[in-house]
Image (spheres, rainbow, N blue to C red):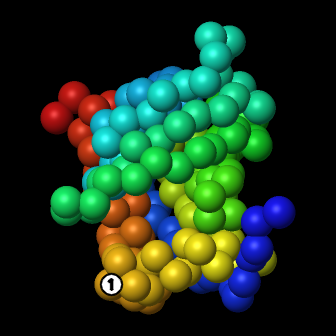
Amino acid sequence: MTSVTGNAPLLESTTEIDATPEAVWAVITDPRALGGLSDQVLRTHVVGTAPIGRGTRTININRRGPLVWPTRAKVIRFERPRDYAFRIKDNASTWSFALEPTATGGTLVTHRREAAEGTTKVSQLLQDKVLGGVADFDREMEAGMAVTLQRLKAVLEGR
């Protein structure tokens, strides 16, 4: 059993994209495409061959400077075209994208990291001792979420 400790803060970033929720959905639910938009996730390998959906498992290769490490995830919400979430087994956090149509035909996209019950002791130790501290790493993650959304916006708006 994975030991979980402390409450981790909610991290969140939001942007409006000039594309339909269906178009945004097609990109965010493709783990291979999504990994390429992240500052930290280099690539994502889907375990198995079934279409992406609730229960899909992935292995993610993450990088920060010279450090490279894998994480394992499972899709826990897949509500087309409005809510996509996956839980990272290694640190007990949930990453999600909430999509809301706008009056102008675009989409308001909110990217979140939640860990209401805290993250694993191993994750906290690694963040503290290897990644510069939990608070600094969280700030870096939140800034990276904004970058991910800006890259997503650029892809969907053809910039």
Residue 53 vs 125, above or below: the answer is above
| Quadrant of the image occupied by residue 6 | bottom right
Residue drawn at x 16%, y 35% as measured from the top left = 159
| Quadrant of the image occupied by residue 21 | top right
Residue drawn at x 19%, y 60% as measured from the top left = 66
Relative to 22, 35 lies left or right: left
Q: Which residue type does callout 1 highlight?
A: Gly
Can you give x and y, in whole percent of width and height, for residue 45 in the image?
Answer: 48, 28
Can you give x and y, in whole percent of width and height, for residue 87 in the image?
Answer: 68, 51
Q: Which residue is mark 1?
A: 132
Relative to 23, 85 lies left or right: right
Relative to 110, 54 lies left or right: right
| Quadrant of the image occupied by residue 79 | top right
Q: Does residue 153 appear in the picture of this structure?
A: no
Q: In front here: 86 or 123?
A: 123
Residue 7 vs 50, above or below: the answer is below
